[in-house]
Image: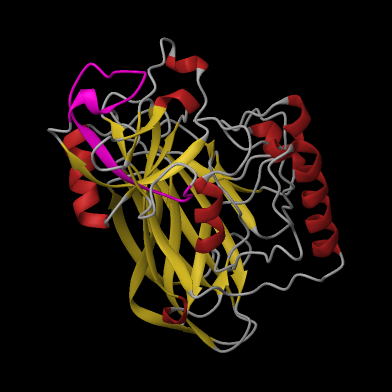
Amino acid sequence: MSCSFGGDPRLAFSMFANGEALVNESVSPIFTDPVHLRSSLDKFLEAVSAGEIDRRSDDWLLTGWNSFDEAGADEMKRAIRKYGGLNAGIFIAPDGIRKHRDTGVPTSYFSAADPDSVETNHCVVLIGWDDDYSRDSFGKYKPEHDGAWIALDSTDMLSDESGLMFISYDDFIQGYWTAEMCERGDYGDILHYDFCPLDALKADEHSTTAANVFTAPSDKALKAVGVTTLADDQRIEIQIFVNPDGDPDGGRTIFTQKVRSARKGYHVIELEKPAALSEGDTFSIVVTYYADSDGGERSGCAPVESEHFPDFEVSPSLKYLSEFRIAVRPGESFVKHGGKWHDLADTATAELFGKDYPIGNIGIKALLE
């Protein structure tokens, strides 16, 4: 999926997974034109540098998101039943929107002769469906088949007062994701180095082992581990070591578990029993991502940040939006290659993996009580 400006759900998911709150518009006003959008971002970055924006907690914490990009209609319907809704990116064509003559509920349909030439320009949440919704209910563009998704829109510019609209099954839609949330108070500190880890790092054809090393901020207990996966049906093994000596896996093992994630995305895995930590203790979370023969090219890859947000294409005036500032510090994120651990802060590590840009942080989080 690509987009011009406005945002990407994966960015919002990452923010909420890190336990961070939204920024008030008094600090960073939101504008939709390129000139003011740039000045808004500059104002935000200045506030960050000046320490005017504290790391704040929201009322909710994201504990999982799942990608259904390759799912068929039946699987999407099951996901809606299970999760309550599917985030979806659509293309809104002004002459493709009309209000139904009887119900007044807006409908949307746009047929792209060449889908690769179209960028999604709006996000909605699919909350239901009507297999019998008539193709004649749509406006200038008539879909070939009956049936429509029932969508909840974020703005009344497109939907009716209830926020609802119908989108044809034949419409151009990309990017289906679900989100799982819990109350922020269910967990304490969230230790992490990554922001949006969607780039891939692969050590060999069978598996990739990566690790983050954290320091306990106080006497706390480690309650869960947050892991990003880049492929469906991804097998992983999680190991936790306390006070590792030298290498991330050189300490005392306190937890080992094998997990298979059905969908690529972000997953919080609870420890069977919280692991007590003393203030100043270092501990490493080591994750091995196993490659399956039919799991796709990203099966067995470790998730890392990228200097350039994947698939984020923008116009020249907004090119700066595709470049994220990543800061990898020594002793934090590691990857194993050739039987040896390599610090991702070392430029030689990027060269080892054939990268011509800095490798970002590993997408592994520690969730404390």
Badge count? 0
Q: How is the image coloured?
A: secondary structure
Seen in the picture, residue 311 relative to 82 is either above or below; the reply is above
Residue 188, position as x, y percentages in the image: 51, 80
Q: Please report the residue visible at 60 percent of the width from the left and 33 percent of the height from the top.
A: 312
Q: What is the quadrant of residue 108 in the picture? A: top left
Give the extent of the magenta segment.
134-156
Which residue, as the protein is rendered here, is positioned at the far top? 113
Task: Confirm whether residue 206 shows in the render.
Answer: no
Name the spot of residue 244 as percent of width and height, x first: 57, 69
Residue drawn at the location 39% of the way across and 66% of the way down? 181
Q: Is residue 358 magenta?
A: no
Q: Where is residue 24 in the image (x, y as percent from the top left)?
A: 68, 66
**92 vs 85, nearest the viewer:** 92
Residue farthest left in this picture: 132
Position of residue 166 measured from the top left corner of the image (x, y, whole percent): 30, 38
Q: In which quarter of the image is residue 256?
A: bottom left
Whether 369 is drawn above or below 271: the answer is below
The answer to which image quadrant residue 317 occupies is: top right
Q: Going 58% across and 34% down the picture, which residue do you hit?
A: 310
Which is nearer the eye, 61 or 105? 105
**Residue 143 inside the magenta-drawn segment:** yes
Observer-nearest of 97 and 363: 97
> Observer-nearest residue: 311 or 253?
311
Compared to residue 90, the image places residue 165 above or below, namely below
Decide if residue 365 is on the left or right side of residue 281. left
Say whether residue 9 is left or right of residue 159.
right
Visible residue check, residue 295: yes
Q: Is the magenta stretch mostly helix, strand or loop?
A: loop
Q: Which residue is drawn at 78% across and 51% down?
A: 40
